[in-house]
Structures are given as structure tokens and as C-alpha cells.
Amino acid sequence: MVYISEDGCGQALALEGMGNFIWATESVDIPDLPNYSSQPLNDFDSCKNTQTVIDYSYNYYGDRAHEYYPAFWQAYNYTPSIMPETKGKWCIPAGGVLNSIYQNKASIDQSLTRINKENIGSSSWWSSSEESSNSAWFWYASSGDFGFGYYGKHNFDYVVRPVIEF
């Protein structure tokens, strides 16, 4: 578990990263996806954000949607071999969830090490939180800070390591 809300619901982190992918190939302010002009520390809607992008991209591009929003489709199609029933339930973490990961990084890494799985590391990870039509937030695992850049959604490929809600 990497995040637990006040009502006892939470999100768990995949035991492995999926590689680096671009957020999107176009600059579009996705309807129904909130924009965060400052660090998205209060955004915990990982799966709602992911589903919003999945729905948007499929409505516009159909079976080619994965070509336009690769990071989201990689997370959405993630299927751990020991849990095939979870396909379609994995999400790109929202900014608040990534912040929670950083706040608990030492204990998460310790748990991952115990089971011989990939630690959080120091790479940059995509969040599902959008900054504007030209950028999305990414997270520096080494410092816990967030960054974004003009056209940040499609000029950079960052780590995709999904979460699942429970």
C-alpha cells in the first residue's frame, strides 16, 4: 500500500515499473481532467484521472488510442501474471499518491527489498495529474518534487509504475 484515505480506501503500487513512455502525442486540454497550476499534492484520483484519459482517447481515436496516450494505455492494460483479473484496473498515480509514496519511500523500499522487487529508485515518473493543455506533472522519485514543462506531455518519456485502488 502506498496511500490510504481517511475512509480506509487506498492504492497499492505495482511491484515493478513498466518502462518509460510518453504521456501523450498531442497538446490537448482533456475535458473533465482537472488542471493543477501548482504541485498536485491534493490530487488522489489516480484511477478517475486515468479513466478520463482512456475514455477521451478511445472516443477520439478508437483502436488507435494507445498510440496517442501510450503511458495511460500501458497502465490500463497492465496485467500481473499472478493477478490476471486486474487487467483494466491499474492506473497512473495522481500527484497526491506520488507524494505519499515519497513520504513513505523508506518503508516501501524496505518492503520491496524483502520480497526481492524493484525499489522506488530515483527516476522521474508520470503522474495522471494534468497541468495545462501543454503539460502534465511528473515526479522526481529522488527528491519528491514535481516538475512540468511546456509540451511536457509529449516530449518526455518517464517511468510508468501503476497503482490499483482497493
Image (cartoon, helix red, strand yellow):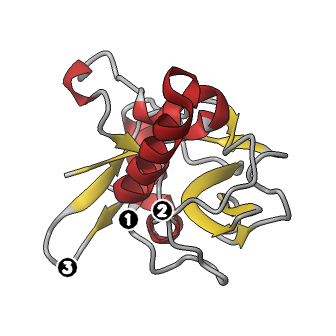
Left or right of 67 in this view: 1: left
At 25% from the left and 61% from the top, the residue drawn is 10
Q: What residue type is labelled 3?
A: Glu
Mark earlier in primary sequence (2, 3): 3
At 65% from the left and 84% from the top, the residue drawn is 38
Which quarter of the image is occupied by the N terminus? bottom left
Crowding near the residue tagged with mark 3, few <14, some 14–19, many ≥20 C-alpha atoms within 10 Å: few
Crowding near the residue tagged with mark 2, few <14, some 14–19, many ≥20 C-alpha atoms within 10 Å: many
Left or right of 4 in this view: 30: right
Quadrant in the rendering for residue 138: bottom right
Of labels 3 and 1, the one closer to you: 1
In the image, which disc is placed on residue 94? 2
Of labels 2 and 3, the one closer to you: 2
Task: For mark 3, give the secondary structure.
Answer: loop
Give coordinates of residue 55: x percent, y percent: 42, 44
Q: Which amino acid does label 1 sit on?
A: Asp
Marks 2 and 3, how far apart in space?
Answer: 17 Å
Label pair 3/1, CB-CB below 8 angstroms:
no
Q: Which amino acid does label 2 sit on?
A: Ala
Crowding near the residue tagged with mark 1, few <14, some 14–19, many ≥20 C-alpha atoms within 10 Å: some
Mark earlier in primary sequence (3, 1): 3
- 75 above or below 146? above
Task: For mark 1, give the secondary structure.
Answer: loop
At 45% from the left and 80% from the top, the residue drawn is 42
Mark earlier in primary sequence (2, 1): 1
Give coordinates of residue 159: x percent, y percent: 65, 41
Q: Name the residue under label 3.
A: 6
Left or right of 65 in this view: 68: right
Q: Mark 1 points at which residue?
A: 45
Marks 2 and 1, how far apart in space?
Answer: 6 Å
Give coordinates of residue 86: x percent, y percent: 25, 30
Label pair 2/1, CB-CB below 8 angstroms:
yes
